[in-house]
Image: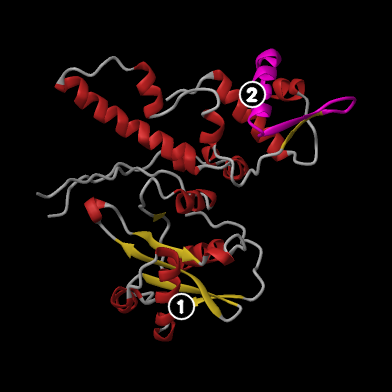
């Protein structure tokens, strides 16, 4: 699954601000760190400001700071600001369901969407910071599980 | 199931195996959270899951300021659909007014330690995806989606 650029930029910005709670960071600093468009990030930060997730401090030495609680703010809270997700997304893009095949396919896609939404909703910004500190992707063994015996118990 | 740095100790907290005299407190705690008093269920659960390393069962309570404020229950399950032994956590509660003090984290860590003592390297759980509170808690402890898919059907 892919997220839109704006959602990814927003998550990067929120994580960066949550990791530096005592500092105000400018949009340019965040954009430089992630190698992303400062112009696009500025628009994203404005949206995060309107949602009362970040606050902008103006003037010399000003910048952005996180005002939402990182232990409560979830990935879903951020993503939903920038794109419809889950069944909401399908409702906006689906053609009318008129056949059994399309209805069955929609049921399967809804199942996938529900999992995606539940995953994003269960991961807070604090949990993401812990995940970044643990770096499980650096552990080669976690990426390759041994082949499983798929014999069902009778 | 990686060993992690232990969380900060919580003053006045004791994590210990559940004993029979905890039953009334457990029923009351569960009733406060779920709204249902399930005396028979808790008696059966205690008899079945009381901590026993050899049987791979773990039933721990959190005593905080001399009151039972939480519990966690798990067991080792082996060879389900060919899967090697792993630890399962299938019940956990912390009294609402004592949440956010680290009691849940200490219960979770104690369960992990109990599984490690009997040689278990992985721990799993299964819960409703709309159980945001507990799902977020397990996520915050480092749990992630595993290689399984839950399936169910209606039996008419």
Quarter where residue A45 is shown: top right
Where is B41 relative to A63, above or below? below
Q: Is residue A57 left or right of residue A112?
A: right
Dot 1 alpha-carbon crowd within 10 angstroms: few under 14, some 14 to 19, many 20 or more: some
Residue A55, magenta (yes or no)? yes
Residue drawn at x 20%, y 26% is A104
The answer to whether the residues at label 2 and label 1 have Cβ atoms under 8 Å apart is no
Where disc 2 sits, the SS reads: helix
Tell me what residue is drawn at x 57 percent, y 62 percent.
B99
According to the picture, the residue beneath numbered tag 2 turns out to be A47
Q: Where residue A118 sits: x, y (%)?
A: 42, 40
Quadrant in which the N terminus of chain A appears:
top left
Camera sees residue A92: yes
- What is the chain letter for disc 1? B
Place of residue A70 in the rendered image (x, y in percent of width and height, measured from the top left): 64, 43
Q: Is residue A118 left or right of residue B142?
A: left
Residue shown at the point (17%, 21%) measured from the top left: A101
Magenta stretch, residue numbers:
A34-62
Percent of width and height locating residue A29: 76, 24
Mark 2 chain: A
Is residue B154 part of the magenta span, yes or no?
A: no
Q: Which residue is mark 1?
A: B17
Quarter assignment of residue A20: top right
Label 2, residues with CA under 10 Å away: few <14, some 14-19, many ≥20? some
Image quarter where the C terminus of chain A lies is bottom left
Residue occupying the point 23% across, 19% down: A97
Q: Is residue B37 left or right of residue A84?
A: left
Mark 1 lies on a secondary structure that is strand
């Amino acid at each position: 699954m892919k997220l839109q650029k704006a959602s990814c930029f927003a998550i990067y910005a929120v994580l960066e601000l949550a990791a530096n709670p005592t500092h105000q960071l400018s949009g340019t600093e965040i954009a430089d760190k992630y190698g992303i468009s400062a112009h696009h990030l500025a628009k994203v930060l404005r949206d995060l400001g309107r949602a009362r997730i970040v606050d902008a401090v103006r003037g010399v030495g000003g910048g952005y700071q996180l005002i939402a609680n990182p232990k409560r703010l979830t990935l879903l809270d951020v993503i939903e600001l920038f794109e419809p997700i889950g069944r909401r997304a399908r409702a906006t893009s689906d053609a009318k369901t008129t056949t059994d095949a399309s209805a069955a396919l929609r049921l399967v896609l809804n199942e996938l969407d529900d999992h995606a939404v539940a995953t994003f909703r269960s991961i807070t910004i604090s949990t993401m910071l812990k995940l970044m500190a643990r770096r499980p992707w650096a552990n080669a063994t976690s990426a390759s599980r041994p082949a499983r015996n798929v014999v069902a118990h009778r | 199931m990686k060993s992690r740095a232990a969380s900060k100790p919580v003053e006045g907290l004791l994590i210990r195996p559940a004993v029979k005299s905890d039953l009334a407190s457990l029923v009351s705690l569960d009733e406060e959270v779920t709204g249902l008093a399930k005396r028979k269920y808790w008696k059966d659960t205690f008899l079945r899951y009381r901590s026993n390393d050899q049987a791979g069962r773990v039933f721990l309570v959190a005593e905080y300021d001399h009151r039972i404020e939480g519990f966690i229950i798990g067991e080792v399950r082996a060879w389900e659909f060919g899967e090697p032994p792993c630890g399962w956590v299938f019940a956990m509660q912390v009294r609402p007014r004592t949440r956010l003090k680290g009691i849940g984290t200490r219960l979770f860590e104690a369960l992990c330690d109990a599984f490690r003592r009997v040689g278990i390297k992985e721990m799993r759980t299964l819960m409703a995806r709309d159980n945001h509170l507990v799902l977020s808690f397990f996520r915050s402890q480092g749990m992630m989606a595993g290689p399984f898919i839950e399936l169910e059907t209606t039996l008419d």
